[in-house]
Image: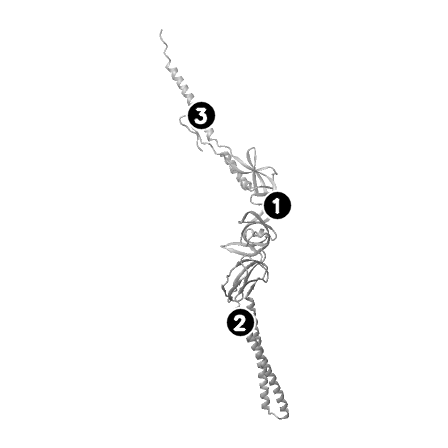
Amino acid sequence: MRQAKPDSGSFEVEMKKTLLFILLGVFLAAGIAYLVFARKPAPSFSTARIDRGDIVATVSSTGTLNAVTTVQVGTQVSGTIHKLFADYNSIVKQGQVIAQIDPSILSSQVEQSQGNYQSAVANLAKMKASARDANRTLERNRQLLREGIVSQGDFDSAETRFHEATSAVRAAEGSVMQTRGAYRHAQTNLRNATIRSPVDGIVVSRNVDVGQTVAASFQTPTLFTIAQDLTKMQINTSVDEADIGKVKVGQPAVFTVDAYPDMRFSGVVSQVRIAPVITQNVVTYDVVIIVENRDLSLKPGMTANVGIEVMRKDNVLKIPAAALRFKPSMAGSDGQRKSTAARRGASASAGQRVFILKEGKPVRIPVQTGVSDGSFVELVSGDLKSGGEVIVEQVLPARKAGTGTGMGGMRGPRF
């Protein structure tokens, strides 16, 4: 028997069918891979809860702590510091001796002026005696002139001597007044050589040492600086001109100092000074804040970071400030068109808006806001309720890198 040979035409047909199926499988796999790797992941959103609470609006500034009343103690006389009776941080009382200038030269000046004064007094007494004698002589000659015993010339001479004596008395009186003033001035200088505290307080600074010469010829030198009462202090702050309109007398303030970073101190605005302070074309105004310092923990010169409470709302509906800044950015061309249309609609409409999630998509809600503390904003009106959530951030998940399909070395798209 003969063996049957295979039909070559049928074989070629089968091979073409097989190759066609393989190509269809390759294209199908490539299409699936493209759809899998080219598809952009849907965005996700971070939300925050809408709650009720207190909102406090503040104006921030920086200032320096100072004593409410600071007295600079100087000297009115020149000389050498002989003794010191007070030092830094010394507690002094009004009238207490705190320094002594060498009194030796001033004492000699007192004695000299006293001698001049006594000499002038004695000379005045002498001039008065001469005037009385001249007056008696004049009266005697007047009587003798009537009787014709003395001539008119003798009478005129006696009258002239009387007037001269009277003038000498007035000159002596002026000399007495002058020397008496010099004597009192010397006594005052001697008293001023003893420096006394003008107020009750504490010595903040001492600017002289024993043996140092001070000159009071042109300007009174400062020997001590005394803070009258450190249990009450003040902060002199510089508030920007953009915020000064919000600051009023009586508003509470909270501040911190670098020495006690974990402590918060309180005060009250006592004065808003209208004099502008211009530094490099920047205009600020000085605001004075009164502070209680009963434990003396605060020191003069400390830098205070102040927050002045300009407005307060209690138990109001509040939303995060980040919700007002949020703008959705949808992925994909269709989503991008929707986002562009949403932004155009948001800019065309008046007022503010937030976004909430409905069926996984952001929905714009018009709102009206009030006071803000920087982190939260008062919700005045809007279709929102306590306990709801608003979108504060859009989160796009990271895409995974494509892997090979195993078909001809094809790889998915990389992102």
Q: Amino acid at mark 2?
A: Gln
Q: Quadrant of residue 85?
A: bottom right
Which residue lies most toward the bottom here?
A: 148
Q: CA distance from mark 1 to mark 2?
A: 72 Å
Residue under label 1: 313
Q: Can residue 308 be seen here?
A: no
Q: Please report whichever mark, 1 or 2, sits nearer to the chain's N-terminal start.
A: 2
Q: Which label was assigned to residue 109? A: 2
Write the residue at 56% across / 69% down: 188
Please count the marks in the image.
3
Badge nearest the viewer, 3 or 2: 2
Q: Secondary structure at mark 1?
A: strand
Q: Position of residue 319 (x, y in %)?
A: 58, 41
Distance Cα–Cα, label 3 vs label 2: 119 Å
Kind of residue at badge 1: Lys
Nearer to me, 89 or 283: 89
